[in-house]
Amino acid sequence: MKIISYNVNGIRAAITKGFIDWLQSANPDVICLQEIKATEDQIPTDEITTAGYPYQYYFSAQKKGYSGVAILCKTKPNNIVFGTGIESMDIEGRNVRVDFENLSVMSMYLPSGTNSDRLGYKFQYMDDIQDYIINLSKEIPHLVVCGDYNICHEAIDIHNPKGNEKTSGFLPEERAWLDGFMKTGMIDTFRHLNKEPHNYSWWSYRANARNNNKGWRIDYCLAAEPLKDKIKRALILPEAKHSDHCPVLVEIG
């Protein structure tokens, strides 16, 4: 199964930039979207169906034009779960999951914490989602948690580690949490197969950052440990330019 994760920073805006044509060309079996910033009735679902994705699951935030996640599938999943049952997460539309016969895929949008008043919410979310995933993994061992984690794990994952060590997204506490989360049995599929530096998935719109590749790797496809031997490919796709993020891909064989 080929899975892509993509923070589109507004699905309607991404569509105006050629997202649907790109989706047909990329041809994943499942694509996890974050920050859709729309409700289902605002999205051209018929066009997405025509592009080969008739099974579309949108989980929008209660606040209009904010947050929200989605999963688009070529084939119908056995089960769909909207949210986590944790109200503080679910009102912001941050998690949706599809279950297939031998694999489950979650689209997750972890809060950014760039505003100081949201940093506490981010840390609470981090604690809650870790407990949720640990418990879920007992029930569903073949789980892939895709999404925008809004955290760079290591210095290799950010263009200027020294200059950003006090910036949300690269705080020691955030990095320690992500490290601990991975140690609960979640594999960073990209780093599992790729050790090279200068691979990023998000760039600021400021200072020509993308053209200069001054970015952050904050988008991940984390696969549960039982899937380790089935990770065939893991890529970052920076040529896709419908957002300030780019897609990340994993292929599970």
Image (tube, grey):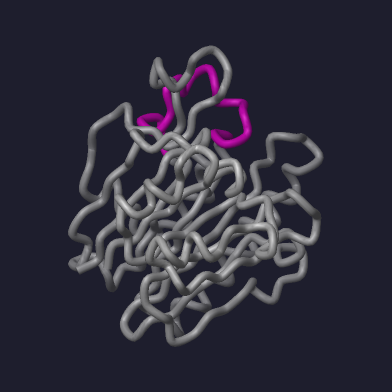
Residue 232, how many percent across, how many down?
18, 59
On the image, the x and y values in percent for residue 158 come to: 43, 28
Q: Which residues are magenta?
A: 154-171
**Residue under the point 45% across and 63% down:** 145
130 lies above or below 11: below
Q: Is residue 67 left or right of residue 191?
A: right
Residue found at x 44% / y 22%: 210
| Quadrant of the image occupied by residue 27 | bottom left
Q: Between residues 163 and 49, which one lies in front from this camera angle?
A: 49
Viewer-nearest residue: 125 or 72: 72
| Residue 81 vertical placement versus 173 (above, below) | below
What is the total number of numbered labels drawn onto the structure image? 0
For the N terminus, the image quarter is bottom left
Quadrant (top left, top right, bottom left, bottom right) of the C terminus: bottom left
Residue appearing at x 33%, y 40% in the figure: 237
Residue 174 vs residue 206, the one in the foreground: 206
The dominant secondary structure in magenta is loop
